[in-house]
Image (cartoon, rainbow, N blue to C red):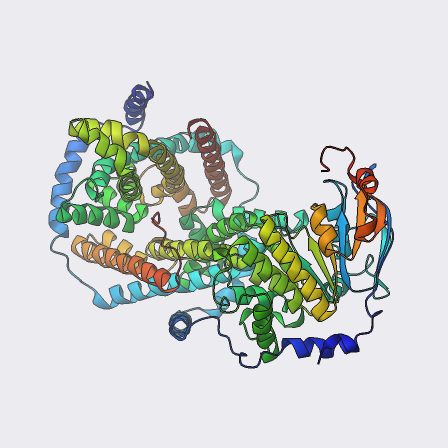
Amino acid sequence: MKGHDLVDARSVTLSIRGLSKEYVPGKPVLQSIDLDIDSDGITAIIGPSGTGKSTLIRCINRLVEPTIGSIHFNHQDIVGLSRSDLRLVRRQIGMVFQEYNLVERLTVMENLLTGRLGFVSAWRAWRRDYPQEDISQAFALLEIVGLSGFENQRADSLSGGQRQRVGIARAVMQKPQLLLADEPTSSLDPKTSVEIMQLLVSISEKFQIPVVVNMHDVSLAKRFASRIIGMSAGRIVYDGDALGLSDQVLQAIYGGEDWMQ
Amino acid sequence: MAWGLLVLYVVWAGARLDFTWSRFVVGLDNAEKFIGRMFPPEILQPDSMLNGLVESLEIAILASFLGILLSLPLGVLAARNLMPAWVSWPARSLIALCRSFHPVIVAILFVKAVGFGALAGILTLTVASLGFIGKLFAEAIEEISLKQVEAVRATGSPFISVLTYGVFPQVFSRFIGFSTYQIDSNLRNSTMVGIVGAGGIGSTLFAAFQRFDYSFVCAILIAIICMIMIGETLARVVRRLLGVDVQKSDV
Amino acid sequence: MSKKVMFKENFMHPDKSMWQRHSRSERLTRLFLMIMVLAAVGYSAQNIEIIPEFLLDAPAQVKDLFVRMWPIQFGFYQKGVHEALMDTVHIASLGTILAVVLAVPIGVLSAKNLIRNVFVNSFARFILVATRSVNSLIWALLFVAIFGPGALAGTLAIAFRSIGFVGKLVGEALEEVDPRSIEALHATGASWMSVLLKGYWPQCEPTFWSVALFRWDINIRESSVLGLVGAGGIGMALDSALNLFQWTRVSLILLSIFVIVIIAEIVVTQIRKRIL
């Protein structure tokens, strides 16, 4: 039985209003961002380096603290939340990183189980005493990402593509309602990048999780994303599908002509 | 050029300290007599010696246990990349204070505070352990990759789990390395804090000296050397069993 | 709620739900170690004689101590402390120099790649281990008995204790030397001494200075207490002050020791920056 027949399409809302971020006072990296994510599929954020793509993504789970603005996740403004409440919200948001950010010295299985840390007591986590369900889930996910049999290998013995698969599996272990990916393919070769994007798409469909991806490869974005958001100088300048991403629009986002074929 | 300066210094300092050749020669003569009296070694008071050795061992074990246990939270608190300044600064100061004084001096102070006996010795070496392990542990934590920690935080993990999954795996083998080094150091120091009354074989040794029982002194010294050599070997075995990289430069 | 059902559907793996972090043998080993440690600690704890009254009295004693040690008798410095403090520095320095001079040949003998004779190696290593195992304070006792009280005993004590430390690290540095450059030198027919100076020394030099500085720093700390058993330096002033219960002088001496140790550390850090 396919899961998506049962899905309530409005079960996740991410609603950002007036989000601004200044690392240095007077020089905002994000300027009054308004954005809604309320359906499944892949949303790609593109734009030149330094335009705030990464900052935007990291504000969503508050790895970076917004300067002003509100971020409503499932109707709850997470900007003002206390540390402990924030943890509860972070449990529901999975994140995939550009440099995989696996714990190198732990095994693949332990890295996967890291995704359940928000749900298991510190004592049980330290003893590696996880519920059967979690272990079973981990094995299932390993199969889905194509890494069956790797569970006891140390993370630092894997290739880049393999590590990112573990990273994705770790995020999905949380049973998240939203998946964030901060330049997940930037450290990978072109072939592996495509594989990873394919994996993200299949996970998004299989588990009905909206995915917000940050990327600088426009062709990848066009190929895999159902919605593309173009940013320039800290503002959203395009919000639509791949078809609408004409050369003029791209020029508005990136500036210059030489880089376009 | 530097070598020349060194030689000059040696001559000058030697004069300041009143080193004369005749003193040295007389001393050598004494040394011969002395070594003669030390050999053959005799165990004149087996009970006292055994008790002393066991007590030294116990002091080392307990001080190491307490020291390692307490250094874990202390080191974490002192890590500037994990903790705000108002937490890390006092923790670092405490660690620096623990390292400031030679164990013998600390032992004297503890003897004044808690009286003669093993307790003073245990407290002394615990303080020494905190100073050593705490400092190195905090430094190790400050060198970790925070990216791994960030990822664990992003899963909504509670702080302790962030430590056990994100921080500790990165510093574990170094921690074992300097913990075993400190255990070895505690074992050595436990043999001498007794000289100032803090328990262990040191007091037996000192008493033997004062009674001029040099053959007994020799026996005790041999026992101490054996005990420490056994300790070093055990440390290596344990590290291998735990699968930790065996450090070469442990002294 | 619907999402929960969907996750469950996709997540239950039919066969696999068991996973252990460590293999059976690893777990047994860890269990064994843990039992040994707890047994050692437990046994020691109940064997140690701790007199509860002393423990309870401790805070009062500490307070009493601090009261007696204040105010610090700075006036005593010029007469009673300064010279002894300088003596301590000389003891540490001469002791370190002597140790290095003696340790290098022994370190060379202990290096397996330089001297192939197993007996010589083992003997050299044994000397290094033995000298390390005896505390400088105990060495001091020995040398005071032989050479009489004073700085000579202290210097020799520092030297002998440091031989093991320096020798071991020098030996290890020698063993880690890249064999290819040595082979190249041998191939040119260079003499044994040349090989040592031109082949081994350049690669070991940084480690050598680093170790020597490190040990000097430690020795400053060690030298400051040797006087407690009569081996010269500031420890002797400390010993008299303690015996006479002159606590304000004690605090002056402790402060001086603290300051000299800090100065030594600064000196070492500066030299390190310049040389290494």
- Residue at point 42%, 64% (across, down): B62
Q: Is residue B28 visible?
A: yes
Give the quarter of the figure containing the C terminus of chain C.
Answer: top left
In the picture, measured across the screen, residue A183 lies left or right of residue A43, that is left
The answer to which of B130 and A200 lies nearer the viewer is A200
Q: Residue A222 appears at what percent x and percent y?
A: 74, 51
C28 above or below B222? Answer: below
The answer to which of B128 and C28 lies nearer the viewer is C28
- Residue at point 78%, 58% (across, down): A226
In the picture, measured across the screen, residue C17 lies left or right of residue B63, that is right
Q: Residue C238 appears at what percent x and percent y?
A: 41, 42
- Which quarter of the figure has residue B235? bottom left
Count of number-bearing discs:
0
B19 above or below A157? Answer: above
The answer to which of A235 and A39 lies nearer the viewer is A39
The answer to which of C193 and B109 lies nearer the viewer is C193
Q: Residue A249 appears at what percent x and percent y?
A: 83, 42
In the picture, measured across the screen, residue A44 lies left or right of residue C72, that is right
